[in-house]
Image (tube, rainbow, N blue to C red):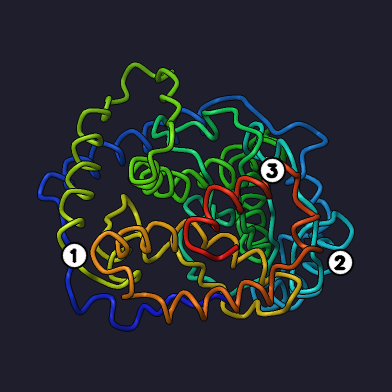
Amino acid sequence: MITIDASTATHRGGSFDPAFKLIRSSVNKNVLTSIDVRRGAANVVPPDHLLLKILHQLGVNRHDTLDEMYYKMRDRVYSISNALKLISATSYGVPQFDFIMDGCSELVLLHATDFEQTAWQNLRPIEFIYHEETNLNTFYGNSGRTDTVAFIAINVLMLAYQYKQWLNWRVRANSMDSSGAFLYKYPLTNAIYSYIDISLFNRILYEQQGWTRVPDKPYRLRVLMNVEDQVTKHVKYVLDTYTKQTRTIAQYLYGTELIYKLSALELIPTVSSLKTRQCKWFFDLSKIPLILYGDTMVQQLNPKYNQGILTAMRRELGQSVDNTIWSRLPVAASSHIKEDMLVKINMF
């Protein structure tokens, strides 16, 4: 598996934008407003939605303890991933479409990993590991591109626990909400936190690479604050500052601030227990944009600085992503990753 060594990343500090505090506050207010609106809506996921299929196969009992759920979900994750052709430690999976995004291929990974318990409403069982959108308007998807890929992980243990707690709440509150309403209001809605962090990172990546960015669709809610001017200035600040400093890939990522995660370094997937060949390719491909971003910074000042690191990454990528894996992706998506990313860092 491709490794980005984060152990020394914090030693050089970061080029933190003094104006970023206001951006973080404004975007967070927009996200919280959007969440309130979604939870107050009468929307439900369609009856054939992938997430509803997963939920039905979890077999959640609202009287199960968390320990009982843990052992049950560790078994269920494999049977569900095999049945629905999703990615897991035992299944290579196939791309999905129209799960959360609009147009792009979605690679969906299932796992059952311990988590920190908090209020059930705030749990985030669905996490974007990476996507290629740049919008901050709280929509999922904006560009309509069909040649990009979104990497999405679902912690079925957390999902089952959240659902159990919701079932108990529904009894106490005498609510008529359906399971489809639960999925829309909580797991899907809460995925916006990871989505927004990646969108902000992509704003900087797109500008750095000279890629054309599709403008955000107009805000549906007039109460949301427009942050376009602030973010544009921030992107310029980051790129202008970093062209004067030689660092490692990890140090560049650490110095790139996000809204909810401390930095882009935290975008590196942390589900360390999943190391089988069936899912290594998922994690390795999701890291390519991070490597491209950091290596482009390095190449501007010291082209030889990362050669040993990139050689090791190239070898590791070749071991986990072969022609069999490429053939699983739509032709447009695999061509995009190879030609627009891997070629630039001499990894293909």
Say if mark 2 contacts mark 3, CB within 8 Å.
no
In the picture, measured across the screen, residue 260 lies left or right of residue 190, that is left
Task: Measuring from the top left, give residue 156's x and y in whole percent.
Answer: 68, 62
Task: Measuring from the top left, give residue 262's x and y in whole percent.
Answer: 30, 61
Q: Residue furthest left?
A: 18
Real-space Cα separation, disc 1 to disc 3, in angstroms = 34 Å
Q: Secondary structure at mark 1?
A: loop
In the picture, measured across the screen, residue 49 lies left or right of residue 339, that is right
Q: Where 236 falls versus 317 (above or below)?
A: above
Q: Nearer the viewer, mark 1 or mark 2?
A: 1
Sequence-first tag of 1 and 2 = 1
* Residue type, numbered disc 1: Gly
Residue of label 1 = 14
Sequence-first tag of 1 and 3 = 1
Real-space Cα separation, disc 1 to disc 2, in angstroms = 44 Å
Q: Quadrant of the C terminus?
A: bottom right
Task: Measuring from the top left, give residue 89's x and y in whole percent.
Answer: 74, 73
In the picture, measured across the screen, residue 258 lies left or right of residue 289, that is left
* Residue type, numbered disc 2: Ser
Real-space Cα separation, disc 2 to disc 3, in angstroms = 23 Å
Q: Where 51 falls versus 175 (above or below)?
A: below
Residue at point 74%, 76% (across, down): 277
* Residue type, numbered disc 3: Ser
Residue of label 3 = 105
Could you say which disc has been placed on residue 79 in the image?
2
Q: Specify few, some or many for label 2: CA neighbours under 10 Å numbering under 14, 14-19, or 20 or more.
A: some
Task: Measuring from the top left, give residue 315's x and y in whole percent.
Answer: 60, 78
Q: Secondary structure at mark 3?
A: strand
